[in-house]
Structure formats: structure tokens, C-alpha cells
Amino acid sequence: MTTVRLPRARRALPRRLALRPAVRPVLCLLPLALVLVVAVRHRSVLAEGFGHLRSAEWPWLAVAATATALTWVAAALTRQGAVMERLPARRLVATQFAAGAANHLLPTGLGAGAVNLRFMTVCGVPLARSSAALALYLLAESIARLGLLLGLLIAFPGALRLGGLLPDGAVGPLLLGIGLLTAVAAATLLLVRRLRTPVVSFLRTALGEARSVHTRPARAFALWGGSLAFPLLQATGLAAVGRALGLPVAPAHMVIAYLAATVAVALVPTPGGLGSVEAALTVALVAAGGPVAVATAVVLAYRIITVWVPLLPGALTLGALVRWKVI
């Protein structure tokens, strides 16, 4: 009996092992398939957006494209600032480009987070510290975005008509909902020990990583400099597209409108903010004083430059990085 079973086991082993390499080509092609699905679903938006670009002033569109490209460099700078280990610069920037595509194909933040988490672990950063670095990046970027928005609102108090951004009586229920969610989360952590233990462990790791990063001036500068540059470059792209299409709103006010809209959209878990970003940006530009028709055209053209044009090359880069085992 033994002499019969052993050859079968030996023949079965290579088959099981052969399934693992077969998964990688599928993962390489998956981003392209998702791009096709998303493009087909939003084909009317694409056609209208490209139509607006044909009537725009091309020098300003070039400024918007340059600002968009620099956002990937700013994101790479912030990612490097969140970890003590030195990450390979070229692969880090390429990963941010690929992560941008993943972020538009999956719920907001999940795509980029998964790509960067995988990249850091491949580079030798332990999973716990990679997760802590990811949380530090998100925290720094959120603080920088909110800080910029509050600072600009103080400098330009009349930039937005806040009444146009929020429906009447919406502030109270919104704050109440946030308070209830916070209370439920705190109570859950206090009562459920199995959940509390890993959360406390993660927080300790994250605090230790944050302290270590801030003992290195170069890392701290990369973290906070990149966190400030990233939303500013995004907002600069919107302001440039606004100038290209003749939106009668001051550039600083367009920057404020962008920051306010993206802060609001951060609460909506849609793939890359598709749909929610367009709506929020249009409302914010109208609240800043822009006509509805022109504001809508600006938003559609801006999303073509920042989302749809880089989406296919970003997906190709993502597939290549998977194939080359960078992620």
C-alpha cells in the first residue's frame, strides 16, 4: 500500500505548486480588466470631459498635468518620511503611480493602501511597522489638508458661501452622528477584549514608529513636507484647469473649494471618489462664486487629467510591478 501511495503524492505535489505561479499573471491582467469596466460605466462622463478639453487653453492644461505628475513625487516623499528604512526611490515613485490607479478601482484609500503595504513588506519592513507607517501617512496627510483648509479660510474668509455647501439643519445631525460613532467605537474597544488587545498593540507600534521618524529631521521633513505639497499640488491642478476654461473664480478660492470638497468626500467610500468627487467639487466651485455650467465643465476636465488619462498607464504599471515582484 505504501509503494502505491507515495508516487501519487509525488505526482500531486507539483500540480499544487504549479497553481501558485499561475495566480500572478491573473493579478497582472486584473487592473486592465477593471479599467475597462470602469471606463465603460463612465463613458458619457469621459466623452463630455474630453469635449471640454478641446476648448480649453492648452498652456494651463500643461500646468495642470505637471502638477498632477508632481503629486506622485509628493506622495513618494511622504511615504518615505513615514518609515525609518530607506526605500528604493524609483520603485517608490512608480508604486505611487500604480497606487493611484488602484485607488480609482477600489474604495477610496483601500487600493493605494494595499499596494503600499505590499511594497513596504517586500522591501523588508515588518508588517506591523508597515501598517503603522501607513496609518502615520494617512494621519499626516489629513492633518496637513485640514490645516491648509483652515489657514486659507482664515486668510480668505469670503472664499466660500458655506450655506451653499451644507443643507439647512445638516450640521447638527452630522455632528451628532460623528459623536455616536465615536462613542460606539470607544465602547466596543472597552468591552471586547479580543478587539482591544490587537488595537492597543497596533497603537503602541504606531506611536513608536512616529517617535522614531521624528527623531530624524530628514524623515520628519519628508513626512510633513510631502503631506503639505500633495493637496496643494492637487488644488493647483484644479485652479489651472479653471483658468484654462475661464472660470471666473480667484485661484486661491478654487484651492479652498478643492480642499473643502475633498475633506467632505473623504467620508464617502466610493472607488477613487468617482461620482462623489465630481459632485462635491462642482458644489464647492459654485459656492466659491462660479457659474454652474462652467464649474461642471472645469470639474469634468480636471478629472479627465487627474484620473482618466493616468488610469490606463497606471494599471499597466501596477501589472508590471506585480509581474516583477516589486509588490
Image (tube, rainbow, N blue to C red):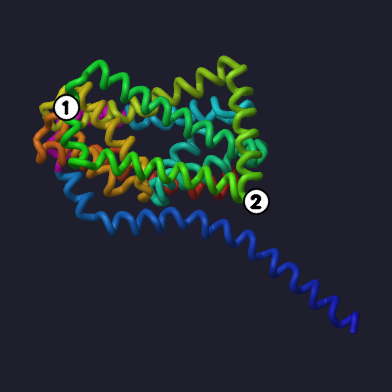
| Residue under pointer 2 | 194
Secondary structure of the residue carrying numbered label 2: helix
Q: Nearer the viewer, residue 205 or 75?
A: 205
Q: Which residue is drawn at 56% across and 17% down?
A: 218
Query: The N terminus appears in which quarter of the rendering?
Result: bottom right
Query: The C terminus appears in which quarter of the rendering?
Result: top right
In the picture provided, is 306 more to the left or to the right than 3? left
Distance from disc 2 to disc 1, alpha carbons, whole Å, reads 54 Å
Which mark lies nearer to you, 2 or 1? 2
In the picture provided, is 2 more to the left or to the right than 28? right
Q: What residue type is labelled 2?
A: Arg
* Image quadrant where residue 203 sits: top right
Q: Nearer the viewer, residue 177 or 23?
A: 177
Q: Which residue is drawn at 37% across and 23% down?
A: 147
Q: Which residue is drawn at 62% across and 45% down?
A: 196
Q: Residue at x 55, y 28 (%)?
A: 82
The local crowd at label 2, few if under 14, some if 14 to 19, many if 20 or more residues have their Cα within 10 Å, is few
| Residue under pointer 1 | 243
Q: Nearer the viewer, residue 274 or 1?
A: 274
Q: In this view, does 50 lie above or below 256?
A: below
The local crowd at label 1, few if under 14, some if 14 to 19, many if 20 or more residues have their Cα within 10 Å, is many
Q: Is residue 72 above or below residue 219?
A: below
Which of the two labelled residues, at mark 2 and mark 1, occupies the earlier sequence position? 2
